[in-house]
Amino acid sequence: MKFQILSDLHLELCKQYHTFSIPTTTAPYLVLAGDIGRLQDYDEYLAFLLPLCNQYMRVFLVLGNHEFYGISRAEGLERATSLEREPSLQGKLSILNRTRYDVPDTNITILGCTLHSQIDADSRESVVRKVQDFRRIQDWSVELHNAEHAADVAWLEEEIESVISGKDDQHDGGVKREKKILVITHHAPTRQESSAPEHVSNPWSSAFATDLLPPENTSLSQLTQVQWWIFGHTHYSTRFSRGKVKLLSNQRGYVFPKNGQGGGLHPPPAAHRHSGVQWIRRVLGLQGDHKTGSEGSITEEFDVSKVIDI
C-alpha cells in the first residue's frame, strides 16, 4: 500500500494555504505529519484540505506544535475535531491524536499522535528561551508538554501491544495475516539521525526529539515492533533504520515567498536552526540530491511527491 508523506509545510508563513499545491501521485493515502499550518487560520486551513480530500481516499493529519500557535491546546483540539467533521471534506480527514486506524482490506494499522518530546530538566531554561511554543501557545508550559509526552508514549505502547497480541488480526481463507504497523508522529522518536548532525547536541534539542528506540533506549520494547515510523518537526529530511524499524521524514521547513509572492527561500529564524543545513543546500541548487549521514542514515531533500510503499 502506498502513502504520500509530507510534513512541516508551514503554510502559516505569509498565508500560503491557497498557493501551495500537492501533485497527484499513485498513492491513495496522504500523510501530513504536523506543522502544516495554524488551526487559528481555520478557514484557510480548511480551504487547503478541501482539494486534498477530493484527491485522496483519505488524508491523515497529525497535529504539530505550530497547529496550536495563537490559541490554547484545548481550543486547538476543538478546532481539529471541527475540521474532521466538516461536511465538505466528505469524512476523508482523519486527525491522528492518539488515534488508531486500520486500513480497510489490508493488514496495515496506523497509529498516530503528536509524541511531544521529553524536555530534560537540565535543558529546560534553554528550551524555554529558544523555543517559541511557550510564548505562542496559550497557557502552555514545560510541565504540560512533558505530561503529554508521557501520555503519548503510554498510548503507543498500549496500542502496539494490542496490535501484536493478535486480538484484531485479519484472516484470509483461514490464514492469519501478520499486522504491519505504521506510526506517524510530529516529534521524532530518536535524537541521533533525526536532526542535522551538528544540531543533535544543541542545549534545546530535547524539544525536538526523545530517545525512545535502541540503542539509546532499550526499555520500551513494544516500540521496536513497528515496521515504519514517519516523523517531522526537525526540518531535516532523512531516512534510516533502528533494528527493523524504518524511520523516514520528508520536511519542507520554513519557505518564505519573496515579497509575499512566489516561492522564494529565506534562511530559518535563529530559534529553529535545525533547518539551516537544508536551506543552504536548496540555495546551492542541491534539491533532489542526497548523501549518506551518520550511522548509515540518508540525508534527503524535501520532495512534495514523496511516496513510500508498505
Image (spheres, rainbow, N blue to C red):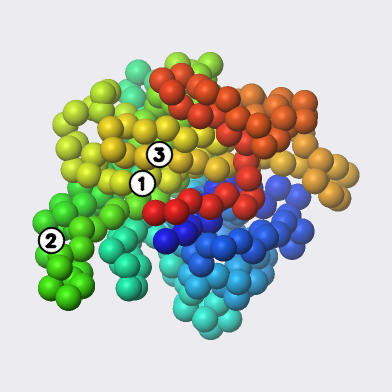
Amino acid at pointer 2: Gly
Q: CA distance from mark 1 to mark 3?
A: 6 Å
Residue 190: image x %, image y %?
A: 36, 31
Query: Which residue is found at the position 27% from the left and 23% from the top?
Result: 216
Q: Which residue is mark 3?
A: 247
Q: Which residue is mark 1?
A: 228
* Mark nearer the N terminus (3 vs 2): 2
Whether residue 79 is visible, yes or no, is no
Q: Are marks 1 and 3 in contact (CB under 8 Å)?
A: yes
Q: Is residue 120 above or below residue 166?
A: above
Amino acid at pointer 3: Leu
Query: Which residue is found at the position 47% from the left and 59% from the top?
Result: 2
SS for callout 3: strand
* Mark nearer the N terminus (2 vs 1): 2
Q: Is residue 80 above or below residue 126?
A: below
Q: CA distance from mark 3 to mark 2?
A: 24 Å
